[in-house]
Image (cartoon, rainbow, N blue to C red):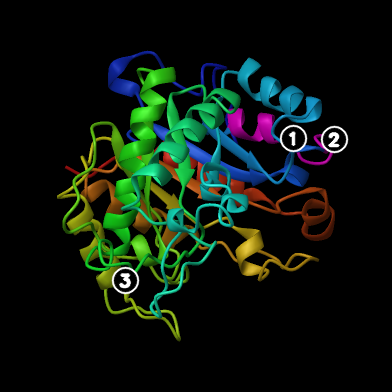
Amino acid sequence: MSFLLSSSCGEDKRNDDKPFFQTRGILLAWNDVNNPDVIDWIAKMKENGLNTVSVSGYNYQSEAYAEMKQKFIDNGLDFVYEEHAMPWLLPRNLFESHPEYFRMDKEGVRRPDFNGCPSNKEAHQVIFENAKKLGKANAPTNHKYYFWLYDGGERCYCDECKDLNDADQGLLFENTIIKALKEIDPEAQLAHLAYDKTTPAPSRIKPEKDIFLEFAPFYRRWDMPLSMREARREGTEWSHGDYLDMLEANLKIFPAETAQVLEYWLDVSLVSGWQKPQKKLDFNKEVFLDDLSTYAGYGIRNISCYGAWIDDYYVNTYKDVSFIDDYGQGLYNFKKEQ
């Protein structure tokens, strides 16, 4: 059963009744939102207290995308862009004329892939200018920018970079990006995505002001809660305990009050191996609620989750999408134990 919330992002204006989790977000794909007669994501979000959305997989500058974005905004929902942005920030077509902008592999060869060379000053200037352009073209409603590094990208091994871990190298780029964004939006905040190779905390580079942690435990299990420290997905390096230790280490670098978790409890694309037709999601409500308590225990008050591929095909095939209600209402009604 769902309940109807006000149009103001599901917020009750009484201070004592505000939800513990401030950001209650969902990351969707274009095909998820373009058939509202089958699944109306705006209605689903408002009914269940979700207040922030990101939609990927379509031309952001198209008229259709702009119309879709405006509908979410007109309904009191925050709209953000969560995207692996490095190919736009450091275009690969610069490699022929400026190979020094790009990362060096372990064999000493420059490669036009992944995240570039974070010690190259000219590369930073290119990223600075392109970050301003990208920020202007894709402005979020809440001043939170998610210009992620390349998905799973390898780091640079040149002499100046080789002793920096992946998160340190990422922060060098992010420190440049936030400075650029501040020129166009003085209230800008920028996510540091702790995901895959950048999950371990930075060890040498400090974040600029208004860079916030976005912690994404991609290689965890979702049939067991994070609080079960010994749990480990088969074939992966990190146990749940390792993830919690890395979260704690990151929170010594980044403020807990602005930190955000990016989870995968509703990610149909992930459980389908990014192959269509989609598989049925096996949502574990007990694990989800236990995870909320775990994150709250670290002082985290902002949570988003992938919900990609919950579209008209999924609804017509599997019918039951009550997990959306469980997710939204679990976040909205959560009470932290004293």
Q: Are marks 1 and 2 in contact (CB under 8 Å)?
A: yes
Q: Amino acid at mark 3?
A: His
Within the image, what quadrant is residue 237 found in? bottom left
**Which element is circle 1 on?**
loop
Residue beneath the point at 35% across and 61% down: 198
Q: How busy is the neighbourhood of tag 3: few (under 14 within 10 Å), some, or many (20 plus)?
A: many
Q: Are marks 3 and 1 in contact (CB under 8 Å)?
A: no
Q: Amino acid at mark 1?
A: Asp
Magenta residues, start to end:
35-47
Q: Upstream in the sequence, badge 3 or badge 2?
A: 2
- Res 40 label: 1
Within the image, what quadrant is residue 75 found in? top right
> What residue did someone put label 3 on?
240
Q: Upstream in the sequence, badge 3 or badge 1?
A: 1
Q: Compared with residue 274, is residue 311 higher up or lower down, i.e. above or below?
A: above
In the visual, does 147 lie left or right of 203?
Answer: right
The answer to whether residue 187 shows anywhere in this view is: yes
| Of 19 and 183, the residue lying toward us | 183
Residue beneath the point at 28% across and 31% down: 210
Within the image, what quadrant is residue 88 found in? top right
Q: CA distance from mark 3 to mark 2?
A: 40 Å
Residue 214: image location, x then y, percent: 37, 47
Q: CA distance from mark 3 to mark 1?
A: 35 Å
Q: Quadrant of the N terminus?
A: top right
